[in-house]
Amino acid sequence: RIIPAVLGTDGAVLDLGRASRLASPDQVRYLRLRDGCCTFPGCDRPPSWCEAHHLREWTTDLGETNVDNLALLCTRHHTDVHTCGLAGRLVDGRIRWRRRQ
């Protein structure tokens, strides 16, 4: 099986499209550098406490597993985002959260 992927300048896999739901180790490393901690407003949980969240949902919105569609969230806020109807988007290299419309 061939999985198309977009690579960074150092060969790191940054975009997997719909080929994989889970972020690759390269994508997680990238998110740790870009996001620095949980992206939920006011949270400073370190990247080691976080997981990759699809901004455009994998299942319902057919979101892709690409770094521009992923954000770090700690376990608590990952749950909150899903249960409270929050949506995030990448704006100027930062994740912005708001209530879904």
Image (cartoon, rainbow, N blue to C red):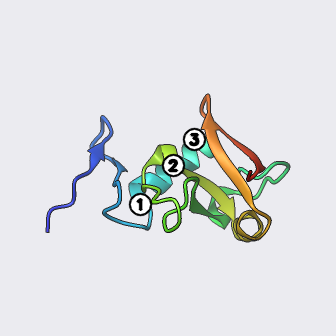
Gap between marks 3 and 2, in whole Å?
Answer: 13 Å
Is there any visible trace of residue 38 in the rendered image?
no
Q: How far across and how far down the image is residue 59, in percent?
A: 49, 68
Which quadrant of the view contains residue 94? Answer: top right
Dot 1: element: helix
Q: Local crowd at mark 2 within 10 Å, few (<14), some, or many (≥20)?
A: many
Q: Local crowd at mark 3 within 10 Å, few (<14), some, or many (≥20)?
A: some
- Report the mark closest to the observer, 2 or 1: 2
Location of mark 3 (residue): 34
- Report the mark closest to the observer, 3 or 2: 2
Gap between marks 3 and 1, in whole Å?
Answer: 14 Å
Q: How far across and how far down the image is residue 41, in percent?
A: 81, 48
Dot 2: element: helix
- Vertical comparison of 96 with 77: above or below: above
Q: How far across and how far down the image is residue 85, in percent?
A: 75, 62
Q: Residue at x 72, y 71 (%)?
A: 79
First in sequence, mark 3 or 1: give its number: 1
First in sequence, mark 2 or 1: give its number: 1
Q: Residue at x 42, y 67 (%)?
A: 21
Q: Local crowd at mark 1 within 10 Å, few (<14), some, or many (≥20)?
A: few
- The three-letter code of the residue at mark 1 reads Pro
Q: Residue at x 70, y 70 (%)?
A: 75
Location of mark 2 (residue): 69
- The three-letter code of the residue at mark 2 reads Asn
The dot on residue 25 is 1
